[in-house]
């Protein structure tokens, strides 16, 4: 019931905020992916709200006891990785027929992810300063070095800042997924080379260099890399006419629901091959044409997708602020499950409103800057 209430609250709130974030109509495929992305970010918020409840009670930050609430986090992030694999390996596949604009692709990724991420780091710094009461507890050089590691999208790690233990908890630890995203982006020129798509020497050298640098300091888990592989498989299947025809049928929607039910009911977590295959099947059907009986193309779903990146990065700070800055950890620990659920449901529209503001003030201007910079010739061709 709390999950359904939070979803309903988010959809009502994003519908009310829709006039500020409604964009041009997307293709049917992209609209479905946008709709899916919106629910995934919201589910990660629900997942961490559940973790916070147990943490307030017992002081342990661990996956929820419930299979459902565990998968709302683990499987949602895995689907984010599949979406990345699907969209960008799809561009590589298309690059066999038409040249890939590598400068635009690289710049669009930087301007899509960096502005909001660095805004989150500013909020993180403010939180650390307030929690430390303005006192510098480590040498200034050490603090600057630790901040730079966070500024690397945590590719170089996410150390505690100014001796505040478990600094990552302020963001609910969501930044762990970002090095995987950059790792995949860096591999795209090599993917293009292997598939005999057009790739310039500059793009190839830049990608290979970035890939080597990331792998020199970051050790990816194979199970997470496998999620990108499922997204790449989905990109290949989505170009097969027979798969498109099958995925567009109502039976495909039934199969997606069955696969997700089997995932939740049969496996306590995602990180083994059988549950990952079940999730991968569901995504391949969605990528091929299944919109879950219109749910993923429904306007509120697509609008929720427009704010998904902000929801993903900001919800941890919102939860931390609620419990540490407004209510207090001790007071929140005394709440009954009903009171806790009611407060989190009431928080959901506020999160949606904040993320709408984030999209309008930070994300959209940065996205538009891609065209402006390239048109003005300020970005050298690779």
Image (cartoon, grey):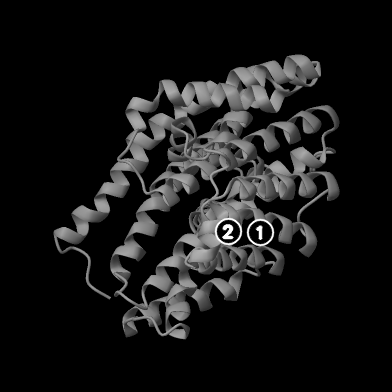
Front position in the image: 303 or 290? 290
Residue that carries the numbered disc 2 in the rendered image: 82
Q: Is residue 72 above or below residue 243?
A: above
Q: Mark 2 or 1, which is nearer the eye?
A: 1
Q: Is residue 115 above or below residue 55?
A: below
- Identify which residue is drawn at 59% across, 55% down: 285
Residue 368: x, y in percent? 26, 47
Report the residue marked by disc 1: 280
Q: Residue at x 45, y 37 (%)?
A: 302
Cα gap from disc 2 to disc 1, whole angstroms: 8 Å
Q: Earlier in the sequence, mark 2 or mark 1?
A: 2
SS class, disc 2:
helix
> Is 372 displayed left or right of 33 in the figure?
left
Residue 267 screen position, x and y as percent: 83, 50
Q: Position of residue 289 (x, y in %)?
A: 51, 52
The foreground one among 236 and 143 is 236
* On-image quarter of the C terminus: bottom left
Q: Which corner quadrant of the image does residue 228 belong to? A: bottom right
Residue 165 visible (yes or no): no
* Picture quarter with the N terminus: top right
Q: Position of residue 79 (x, y in %)?
A: 61, 53
Can you tell which quarter of the image residue 312 is in? top right
Of residues 248 and 304, the one drawn nearer to the viewer in this rendering: 248
Q: Is residue 261 visible?
A: yes
Q: Residue at x 59, y 36 (%)?
A: 42
Tell me if residue 336 comes above or below residue 239 in the rendering: above
Per the image, label 1 sits on a secondary structure element best described as: helix
- Crowd band around label 1 with a 10 angstrom C-alpha radius: few (<14), some (14–19), many (20+): many
Number of numbered tags placed on the structure image: 2
CB atoms of marks 2 and 1 within 8 Å? yes
Q: Nearer the viewer, residue 125 or 187?
A: 187
Left or right? Give the position of 53 relative to 129.
right
């Amino acid at each position: 019931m709390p999950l359904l209430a939070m979803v309903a609250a988010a959809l009502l709130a994003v519908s009310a905020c829709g006039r500020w974030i409604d964009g041009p109509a997307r293709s049917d495929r992209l609209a479905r992916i946008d709709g899916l992305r919106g629910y995934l970010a919201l589910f990660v918020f629900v997942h961490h709200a559940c973790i916070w409840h147990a943490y307030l009670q017992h002081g342990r930050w661990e996956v929820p006891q419930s299979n459902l609430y565990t998968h709302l986090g683990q499987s949602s992030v895995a689907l984010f990785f599949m979406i990345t694999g699907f969209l960008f390996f799809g561009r590589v596949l298309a690059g066999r027929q038409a040249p890939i604009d590598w400068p635009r692709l690289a710049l669009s990724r930087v301007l899509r992810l960096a502005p909001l991420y660095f805004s989150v780091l500013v909020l993180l710094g403010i939180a650390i300063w307030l929690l430390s009461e303005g006192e510098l507890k480590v040498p200034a050089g050490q603090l600057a070095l630790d901040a730079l590691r966070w500024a690397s999208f945590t590719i170089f790690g996410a150390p505690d800042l100014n001796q505040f233990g478990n600094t990552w908890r302020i963001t609910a630890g969501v930044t762990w997924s970002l090095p995987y995203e950059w790792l995949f982006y860096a591999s795209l020129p090599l993917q293009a080379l292997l598939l005999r798509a057009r790739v310039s020497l500059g793009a190839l050298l830049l990608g290979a260099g970035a890939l080597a640098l990331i792998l020199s300091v970051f050790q990816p888990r194979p199970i997470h890399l496998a999620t990108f592989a499922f997204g790449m498989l989905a990109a290949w299947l989505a170009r097969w006419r027979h798969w498109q025809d099958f995925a567009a049928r109502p039976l495909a929607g039934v199969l997606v629901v069955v696969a997700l039910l089997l995932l939740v009911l049969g496996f306590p977590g995602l990180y083994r091959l059988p549950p990952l295959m079940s999730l991968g099947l569901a995504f391949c059907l969605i990528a091929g044409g299944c919109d879950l009986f219109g749910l993923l193309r429904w306007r509120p779903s697509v609008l929720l997708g427009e704010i998904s990146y902000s929801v993903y990065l900001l919800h941890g700070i919102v939860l931390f602020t609620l419990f540490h800055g407004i209510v207090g950890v001790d007071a929140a620990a005394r709440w009954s499950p009903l009171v806790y659920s009611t407060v989190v449901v009431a928080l959901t529209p506020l999160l949606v409103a904040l993320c709408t503001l984030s999209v309008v003030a930070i994300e959209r201007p940065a996205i538009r800057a891609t065209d402006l910079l390239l048109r003005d010739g300020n970005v050298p061709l690779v």
